[in-house]
Image (cartoon, rainbow, N blue to C red):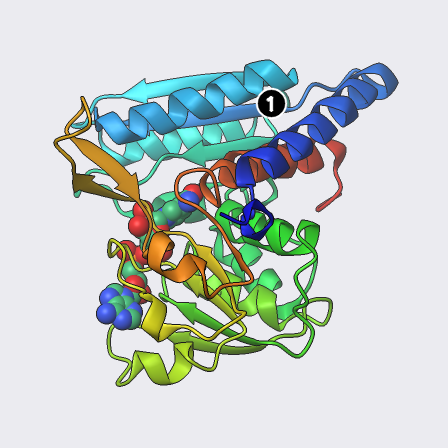
Amino acid sequence: MDESKIINGKEISDIIKAEVKRETEELKAATGITPGLAFILIGDDPASEVYVRSKGKACDSLGFYSVTEKLQSNVSEIEVLDLIQRFNDDNNIHGILVQLPLPRHINEEKVIEAIDYRKDVDGFHPVNFGRLVIGSSSYIPCTPYGIVELLKRSKVNTNGANAVVIGRSNIVGKPIANLMLRKEINSTVSICHSATNDLRDFTLNADIIIVAMGKAEFIKSDMIKEGSVVIDVGINRVDDTSKQRGYRLTGDVDFNSCFEKVSKITPVPGGVGPMTIAMLMKNTLDSAKGKIYR
Ligand code: NAD
């Protein structure tokens, strides 16, 4: 196996976290400011608990201050909004993250819009999203931001490339498509989704394919072009009796069948996944520095 084809997200995210840690020490020494991140976790979804715990651990290891408020699943919307307001007003908090998904009785849009956009380190607030599209300074959602860093640091030539994004979610598909359009990336972008008539028609012409579908191993070797770069965002659980836990994690791309054809590819796990937390830390540090909004 030609290891040089693999874009190693674990390695790249470790480099970014080391950069953030060093800059955090410098910021503390120069200003006394410690980057602070508040997590709001509602209910007891095991996956959400794992995500918040690992983000909290990242805060500890990089020298951030963090606080987690765990609320019962029957908490009222107004209580959640009040808590957000408290963190909006707290000068020790530079980033607020409400772990999604929320219980059905809580309006996700209202919650996201209640976060002060200057502390919206997830980049989901309409102000940040709008500024991202315009190309102004904003918080960039962490997974798309991580993809951009993977492409840059792996020296993928994006200039004039045909980039195909599969998936149109607000957290991955739409923001990454807009980022790929930016002058410094300069790709020609197509966005495919569940109503796209002939997906292969797009993927077979793609120099770069970014897949965020949530469909295990959907993209096969006969759907991609020789020499293409494949970024696999998907995280899917598939049954696997050979594993003690009864399942394995896999991406939206059939890694083994595509490997021969690609020039570069991200594995799952160990590709896009680890980048998400690294970019959350970077956004929070930038908030503490007043780099995005002064
Ligand atoms: P989503 O689940 O909100 O939407 C999936 C998208 O795929 C939709 O826009 C849909 O139109 C498109 N789609 C579905 N079937 C299709 C088909 N046959 N052809 C073309 N398009 C099709 O998406 P999401 O929240 O962006 O998540 C996508 C995947 O990425 C999931 O597996 C999720 O777990 C993973 N994810 C990973 C990270 C990470 O940190 N690595 C972060 C976010 C999401």
In this picture, residue 271 sits left or right of residue 145: left
Residue at mark 1: C-beta within 8 A of ligand 1: no
Q: Residue at x 50, y 27 (%)?
A: 87
Q: Residue at x 69, y 49 (%)?
A: 153
- Which residue is under mark 1? 36
In this picture, residue 51 sits left or right of residue 34: left
Q: Residue at x 50, y 33 (%)?
A: 96
Q: From the top left corner, tell me how far across and down residue 135 is, in percent.
A: 67, 66
Q: Amino acid at mark 1?
A: Gly
Seen from the viewer's position, the closer of residues 11 and 263 is 263
Judged from this view, the residue extending furthest toward the right is 30
**Res 53 visible:** yes
Seen from the viewer's position, the closer of residues 248 and 145 is 248
Point out the quarter of the image occupied by ligand 1.
Answer: bottom left
Judged from this view, the residue extending furthest toward the front is 1
Q: From the top left corner, tell me how far across and down residue 230 is, in percent.
A: 48, 61
Quarter of the image where one finds residue 46: top left
Q: From the top left corner, tell me how far across and down residue 139 is, in percent.
A: 60, 48
Say what secondary structure mark 1 lies in: strand
In the image, is residue 123 above or below residue 253? above
Seen from the viewer's position, the closer of residues 122 and 258 is 258
In the image, is residue 159 above or below residue 112? below
Q: From the top left corner, tell me how far across and down residue 148 is, in percent.
A: 61, 55
Dot 1 crowding, Cα within 10 Å, few <14, some 14–19, many 20+: many
Q: Residue at x 71, y 46 (%)?
A: 292
